[in-house]
Image (tube, rainbow, N blue to C red):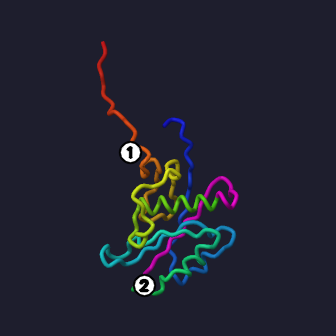
Amino acid sequence: MQNRKVKLIQIDWEGPFTLNELNLLTNDSHDYGIYQIYGKHIVYGKDVLLYIGKADRQTIGKRISQENWWNTNDSNQLKIYAGRIAGEHTPEEDVWSKEIDFAEKLLINVHKPAYNSKSLTSILGVELQDIHILNWGDYRDLLPEISGLRWTSILNSKEYEIYRYSATE
């Protein structure tokens, strides 16, 4: 376990935005990443996390506009939060895309939003075991920090022992 190479993904969250403000999320230089949608759910109540999605190789505003959120029962009550991947420098497009994909998978499987049920898996893949996400800014109901080691099955088979103090004279 000591020699693991952790891949840190930092997400800077901004919001809320309404569906009518999607044009504010269409900047081709940086509006890519993850988004959260909050609204009313018949079982869970109002202003709850409904959905986590990704916008990869298209802006967040464009991606959300392709979905059917306008036809939900309270579309004027929906709140959208945009999460942009952040770091020391912008990586190559393929690396950026992979980070968006990993972040979306891990966030969905940890938080289990009601409208993401088809994206949930019982055991996350090995590819996510070394992912570590830090959420910054207005990340709302998401955990501030998420570790793939904790949420994948990699540690399930590892033997460990509870530390015990043994007095030696």
Which residue is labeled 2 in the image?
Answer: 72
**40 in magenta:** no
| Amino acid type indicated by mark 1 | Asn
Magenta part of the protein: which range?
74-95
The structure residue drawn at horizontal position 68% and vertical position 72%, both measured from the top left corner, is 28
- Percent coordinates x, y for residue 25 in the rendering: 60, 75
**Quadrant of residue 82 in the image?**
bottom right
Q: For this rendering, which residue is in front, 64 or 143?
A: 64
Residue count near mark 1 (Cα–Cα under 10 Å), binned few <14, some 14–19, many ≥20: few
Q: Which numbered marker is on residue 18? A: none
State the separation of the CA atoms marked 1 and 2.
40 Å
Which label's residue is closer to the chain start, 1 or 2? 2
Q: Which numbered marker is on residue 156? A: 1
- In the image: residue 66, left or right of residue 165: right
91 is higher (above) or lower (below) than 27: above
Residue count near mark 2 (Cα–Cα under 10 Å), binned few <14, some 14–19, many ≥20: few
